[in-house]
Amino acid sequence: MPFVARTKHREAPKLNLIPALKYFVGAIALTASNAWGEPLVTAPNSNCKASDVLLHNGVIYTANTQQWQADVVAVKAGRVAFVGTEEQAKGWYCGAKETIDLKGSTVFPGFTDAHQHLEGVGKRTRTLSLFGLPTLQETVEKIKAFAANVPSGEWVLGRGWIEREWQDEQRFLTAADLDPFTENKPLFMPRADGVSAVVNSKALAMAGVTKDTPDPEGGKFERYPDGTPTGYILATAMDQFRAILPHESDEYIKENLRRGMEVNVSRGWTHTHDAGMKIREVEQLRELAKNNAMLHRVYIAMPIDDASYLFSHGAEKAPNAMFNLNAIKVFIDGTLGSRGAALLAPYSDADHNGFMNRTTKTELMPVLDEALRNGYQIMTHVIGDRALKVTLDWYEESWKALPQAQWKTQDLRWRLEHAQIIPPEEQTRMARLGIIASMQPSHAIGDLNFAPARLGAERLTYAYPWKPLVDKGIKVVGGSDAPVEVGDPRIEFYAAISRSRLDGSRGDGWHAEYALSREDALRMFTLWPAYASFQEAEYGSIEVGKYADFSVFDTDFMKAVPADILNAETIMTIVGGKKVFVRQ
Ligand SMILES: [Zn+2]
């Protein structure tokens, strides 16, 4: 991992003569020279403006409509001290302690992944990953090879399989696929969406699940006609397996968080919104923050099951804004791929309309009340139109139930996470209520492979409707949901502007017209996520006074052909003026 944090510390401001001479000829009296004809520079010119680092000779996009592009940016004490043209930058070169020649690369305001799971991103670096395998057969073989090295009696763990991308058979994994080589080893492997999983017969036996076990509220055991569980389990049915998984130490969790940040900054993220961080993860991350070991900023939502922790501790933000706990993540329905998303009308390819109640109304309403009283943000996982409609109903009901005088703030900015299927009247309601749509462009370009079958043509007219939402004035914030997806700003940006598969192709009903302009795609990963975490005054654009968070790539996302964005290289990631990643 090419991680480098090597900010140069120099005591005195130093003239970087090459650029200085290049730009200051005629502007500042650099005419004094010694006997050898070398310029005499003893102290910074009084016209020099001090900064810690200055970036120049590249393309700088600010995401600030008043000054969309700039040539030079200077950073002082972790914040933007200057951003402007070469002409305006004159006094800044000579006062910079360090000058970075961008050599033509492109600087963006720090990219924010507005929905991811940091611990999972780190854990993915050390458990079996089944992402990207082309066939069911290869997936099973990879699990078999991995399981062979797991001692008898221990758990076989991995994640990321996704049947819809297999070329041989597109069906869910079952215990029968895995039992032949895991007889004495329980196995638990979540599908890529993390909302369903496959377990083997040993795990079913250990959890005490038989054909007589009823489906839990908000979950399901897939079964053979005689009722025997197949081993494919959905949503809350995963809980009783998670409960018997081996204990993970605090150190293990902390290391996963650290690795997750390392992966993120290498991809160019300067900030993530964590959509459901459990108590132990929060505590380990806080420790990393206190030890100055954060590589990027994290805005945290705790899952509703852990909401009492937030209620008793209160919101919490580190002085340097690297750690920020302020939200609650609620789960309502499942996913579209597994037909777990709750739809108003039945699936076009099944005789049911999905399920919800992963969180019941009885559980949710007191939490919404507490959130209103204390200013906590609510972020709710909704995918189907039924889940979305009902959640908006509940939001509104809670607002009516508590007199506004008892709200901590009227500025709620409550969010819907995923929000994949939004009928036009609900889009209008979201705009009216000031609801934020937190969406994952990469989900759409994957889901659109099967969404026509699940939803039918009519519902596709309001599925993944980025542009219609933006046109209604709704803030659409972009995220990857990593480790569900790769967690790569290049893929997310590409998907947002192209709305096509990575190979550029696009199927029927993909509604290319719902893609975003590049300007809006940039806002979707910078300014709008800052707003969606109540921090638009602090970052999200490159403006004087805001934190110096920059994502630097060798490719200009605003001009490159879309395919070239996918091949871009992260050159440098800067958080609070500090280089947290530098491409070697
Ligand atoms: Zn998620």
Image (cartoon, rainbow, N blue to C red):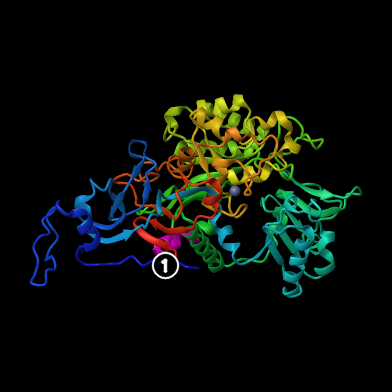
Report the side of 386 relative to 95 (left or right).
right
Residue 123 location, quadrant = bottom right
Residue placed farthest to the front in the image?
Answer: 37
Ligand 1 within 8 angstroms of badge 1 C-beta: no
Q: Amino acid at mark 1?
A: Val
Q: Is residue 169 above or below residue 347?
A: below
Image position, residue 326 (x, y; %): 46, 46
Number of callouts: 1
- Looking at the rendered image, the quarter that the C terminus falls into is bottom left
Report the side of 67 relative to 421 (left or right).
left
Image position, residue 174 (x, y; %): 81, 56
Residue picked out by circle 1 = 4
Residue range highlighted in magenta:
284-295
Q: Is residue 64 above or below residue 89?
A: above
Image position, residue 201 (x, y; %): 82, 61
Q: Is residue 293 magenta?
A: yes
Residue 145 location, quadrant = bottom right
Residue 64 location, quadrant = top left
Q: Is residue 573 above or below residue 359?
A: below
Q: Is residue 378 magenta?
A: no
